[in-house]
Image (cartoon, grey):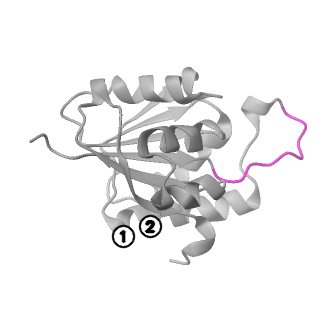
Amino acid sequence: MDATRWLIVVRHAKSDWSEGLPDHERPLAPRGLRDAPRLGRWLAAEGHVPELVVCSTARRTRETWLRVSDELPAPPPVEYDDDLYGADVRELLNAARRTPPDVTMLALVGHAPGVSDVTLHLAGQGEKTLPVQTKFPTGAAAVLATTDPWDDLRTARLVAFFQPRDFTG
């Protein structure tokens, strides 16, 4: 039996719309600056520390991951990928499928609706995924487990879903 692989799907924290910047350059809002470290503390506390991160190049995703990784025991290597900006299911799956086989825990940091769509694509629409079906808020993360090899990732099960409002640590 293959080893379990873990996919952490992260939506960037709350971004700021007030500066009139192009979408790709929007920074985090004060709430996002507060919520992103919560995700990092939760990931560390739950033992969901990625070995590799593939992150959208948008400013808000980069800022989110920087603040998340500041809370981890050791920041993992990060690859910034233009394809994750506005990525759909296919593009997010392609990013995961390029993961080296020796990586057992991968994080993808992206945007709505792609993050919820890929989570539901992999884990299905059952009762277990109801929180994702309802809303995948900014600063949230889905943790999925699979025995599929990365290069043939097709299915996974949702094992945890983090929302900033549910964690005060």
Q: Which residue is mark 1?
A: 45
106 to the left or right of 121:
left
The answer to whether any part of residue 135 appears in the image is no
Mark 2: few/some/many CA within 10 Å (<14, 14-19, 20+): many
Q: Where in the figure is residue 136, as x and y percent of width and height?
A: 62, 53
What are the residue bounds of the magenta stretch?
Answer: 13-21
Farthest residue to the front: give it.
126
Q: Where in the figure is residue 62, as x and y percent of width and height?
A: 58, 40
Q: CA distance from mark 2 to mark 1?
A: 5 Å
Q: Residue at x 56, y 28 (%)?
A: 84
Is 104 included in the stretch rendered in magenta?
Answer: no
Mark 1: few/some/many CA within 10 Å (<14, 14-19, 20+): few
Residue type at numbered disc 1: Ala
Establish if 119 lies above or below 49. above
Q: Nearer the viewer, residue 125 or 62?
A: 125
21 to the left or right of 78:
right
124 to the left or right of 111:
left
